[in-house]
Image (tube, rainbow, N blue to C red):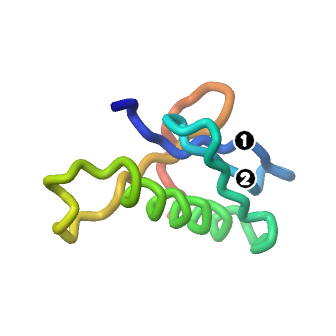
């Protein structure tokens, strides 16, 4: 199974608006309707990705656990992981 990460595919003035799943190119997360500050947008896209990850990519042995979802956040271009700002 491919490693699934959140990839930002569209932003406006450094505020992420749309994201996708690196393992599912047809999946798009559109948070443009909920536009807020950069941190709010990151949280919204991360929450959308977490739901997708839990439904599609989470290993079967973890389905009944309360472990947090995959915490990936990948910026388009350099594909480096970013830690959410505090």
Q: At which x and y percent is residue 37?
A: 74, 69
Which quadrant of the rendered structure holds the N terminus? Answer: top left
Q: At which x and y percent is residue 12?
A: 85, 52
Front residue of 4 and 81:
4
Label 1 sits on residue:
9
Which residue is the extreme one toward the top?
78
Q: Residue at x 39, y 59 (%)?
A: 55
CB atoms of marks 2 and 1 within 8 Å = yes
Which label was assigned to residue 18?
Answer: 2
Q: Secondary structure at mark 1?
A: strand
Instruction: Write down the quadrant of residue 7 in the picture.
Output: top right
From the viewer's perspective, tell me whether residue 71 is left or right of residue 60: right
From the viewer's perspective, tell me whether residue 65 is left or right of residue 31: left
Q: Residue at x 66, y 56 (%)?
A: 29
From the viewer's perspective, tell me whether residue 52 is left or right of residue 28: left
Q: At which x and y percent is residue 76?
A: 66, 34
Measure the C-alpha gap from mark 2 to mark 1: 6 Å
Question: Disc 2 or 1, which lies upstream in sequence?
Answer: 1
Q: Secondary structure at mark 2?
A: strand
Q: Residues within 10 Å of mark 2 (few under 14, many from 20)?
A: some
């Amino acid at each position: 199974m491919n490693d699934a990460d959140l990839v930002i595919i569209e932003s406006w003035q450094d505020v992420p608006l749309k994201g996708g799943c690196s393992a599912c190119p047809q999946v798009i997360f559109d948070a443009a309707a909920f536009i807020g500050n950069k941190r709010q947008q990151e949280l919204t896209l991360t929450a959308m990705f977490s739901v997708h990850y839990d439904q599609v990519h989470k290993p079967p042995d973890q389905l009944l656990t309360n472990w947090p979802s995959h915490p990936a956040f990948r910026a388009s271009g350099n594909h480096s992981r970013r830690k959410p700002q505090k």
